[in-house]
Image (cartoon, rainbow, N blue to C red):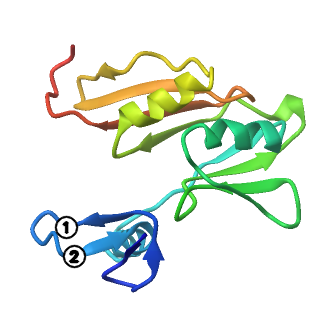
Amino acid sequence: MATCSCCANEREHVAALGCHPEVAICGPCISWLRSSLPRSVESTPILAVTDLDQAAAFWAAVDQDVRRWEGGGFAFVGTDESVVDLGEEPEEAAGGGTCYLQVGDVDLWHSGWTAAGYQPSAIEVMPWGMREFRVADPSGNIIRVGQPSPDPSPA
């Protein structure tokens, strides 16, 4: 656990500033800072799933917490803040969604889902400068995961 330099809360994960490594900020404070920029937009995708237990196991494979709404039928995925929300729907209404997650370590996410048997695609360097892959959740939603590539030329 580390202390966030902004809110002073103890957090499992903080990120240090490149120019001031002694300043470390947690995800919620980074999100607050980003939203304070003029014309800033933040979005949280809602994926329709058929079974919250299956969905929770899928996200747990990449170390994400799943917090269920006490009213039922809805959950929030993320370690410090919600990155994806899940809405439980009947089979005919679930799946078919897509979201893109930009992460700090694409290899870690890829290996987590691979180890759990979810069969993500290979990691590719894309022409737009991202290393990314895609994987389907148990309901058929497509999750694309990427991080900036140090070498933006395709492999």
Q: Residue at image x 34%, y 75%?
A: 33
Q: Nearer the viewer, residue 44 or 75?
A: 75
Q: Nearer the viewer, residue 97 or 5?
A: 5
Secondary structure of the residue carrying tag 1 is: loop
Q: Is residue 118 above or below residue 63?
A: above
Displayed quadrant of residue 5: bottom left
Instruction: Identify the residue under disc 1.
Output: 17
Q: Nearer the viewer, residue 19 or 102?
A: 19
Residue contact between numbered discs 2 and 1, judged by CB atoms under 8 Å: yes
- Per the model, the C-alpha gap separating discs 2 and 1 is 6 Å
> Which tag, 2 or 1, sits closer to the chain's start?
1
Instruction: Identify the residue under disc 2.
Output: 23
Q: Using residue 103 as the reference point, say whether residue 20 is left or right of it.
A: left
- Residue farthest to the front? 1
Mark 2 residue crowding within 10 angstroms, few (<14) / some (14–19) / many (20+): some
Secondary structure of the residue carrying tag 2 is: loop
The amino acid sitting under disc 2 is: Val
Displayed quadrant of residue 142: top right
Q: Using residue 16 as the reference point, say whether residue 3 is left or right of it.
A: right
Q: Residue at image x 37%, y 21%?
A: 123
- Image coordinates for residue 114, horizontal then vertical, percent: 53, 22
- Image coordinates for residue 60, horizontal then vertical, percent: 63, 43
The amino acid sitting under disc 1 is: Leu
Which mark, by number, is residue 46?
Answer: none
- Image coordinates for residue 95, horizontal then vertical, percent: 73, 31
Q: Is residue 110 above or below residue 154?
A: below
Q: Using residue 72 as the reference point, say whether residue 21 is left or right of it.
A: left
Mark 1 residue crowding within 10 angstroms, few (<14) / some (14–19) / many (20+): few
